Amino acid sequence: MTLKLISTSNYEELSQEAAEEIISRIKRNPSLNLGLATGSTPTGLYQELIRDHKQNQTSYKDINTFNLDEYIGIPKKDHNSYHYFMCEHLFEHIDIPLDQTHIPDGTAKDLDKECRRYEQFIEEHGGIDLQILGIGQNGHIGFNEPGTPFDSRTHIINLAESTRKANSRFFESLEDVPKQAITMGIASIMDSKEIFLLVSGTSKAEALARLMNGDVSEHFPASILQNHRNVTIFADKEATALL
Ligand SMILES: N[C@@H]1[C@@H](O)[C@H](O)[C@@H](COP(=O)(O)O)O[C@@H]1O
């Protein structure tokens, strides 16, 4: 098992440490293929990247980004789309050309074709150098819910009710939360050369303990990370409480 754990005293420190490591990777490789995640956890990291870009002019002009997932049926301009989320939390505030930011299209007419296109597109770009991940309380990564085959590629997923409930805080009501999403598959995520997993807060403590000490099983998707060669987990004190 090669999971490396960096535990920090709080969320701010977690965000800063992860940002520092990403910036050092960008300095080494200015045309890094960077995999990005949504959710509350990486927003502090994105703020740190923006702060650094303004202060130290770290440039993203040759970076390509690839997001993990997108809701199905939510237009890009809708405030709840992950397109909107990424523009608001990162892309608008750094010098990345928007045509180098890639997110699955959850409004595509032929969604199966879109899944194949996205998967192939990442491959054509040479694969992801560094993937940022969060984790759901049920162990989902991207939107790969428990039971998703480990050999899955980008696909359409039915969201677990618990995931819809957890994400309903961003919507007006639970009914407004989409029932499906497009997500990179487990195998697509595992193809990344390096992975940073961000875990924050007591609500994630059980998931982190299970990920680090439990069996590798499709019932708990994040457990597959135990089989990856280069994973760093950034976790704050609250998240590490059960380790
Ligand atoms: N698709 C995203 C995941 O990529 C994210 O990791 C998870 C946890 O989100 P949060 O960081 O808000 O707890 O939520 C969503 O379901």
Image (spheres, rainbow, N blue to C red):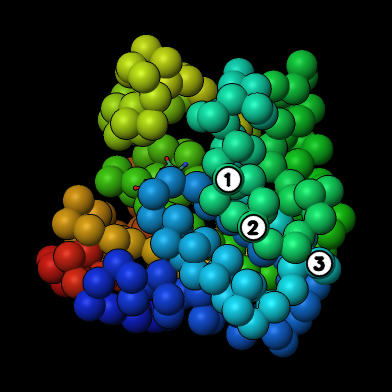
Judge left or right: residue 179 versus residue 172.
right
Examine the rendered structure and indicate whether residue 100 appears above or below residue 74.
below
Badge 2 marks a residue whose secondary structure is: helix
Residue 232 sits above or below residue 131 on the image: below
Report if the CB atoms under discs 3 and 1 are less than 8 Å apart. no
For disc 2, the marked residue is 93
Q: Residue at x 70, y 85 (%)?
A: 27
Image coordinates for residue 5, horizontal then vertical, percent: 34, 79
Q: Secondary structure at mark 1?
A: helix
Per the image, label 3 sits on a secondary structure element best described as: loop
- Name the kind of residue labelled 3 in the image: Lys
| Identity, as a three-letter code, of the amino acid under mark 1 | Glu
Question: Residue 61's mark?
Answer: 3
Q: Amino acid at mark 2?
A: His
Residue nearest the observer in this picture, 82 or 206: 82
State the residue position of label 1: 88
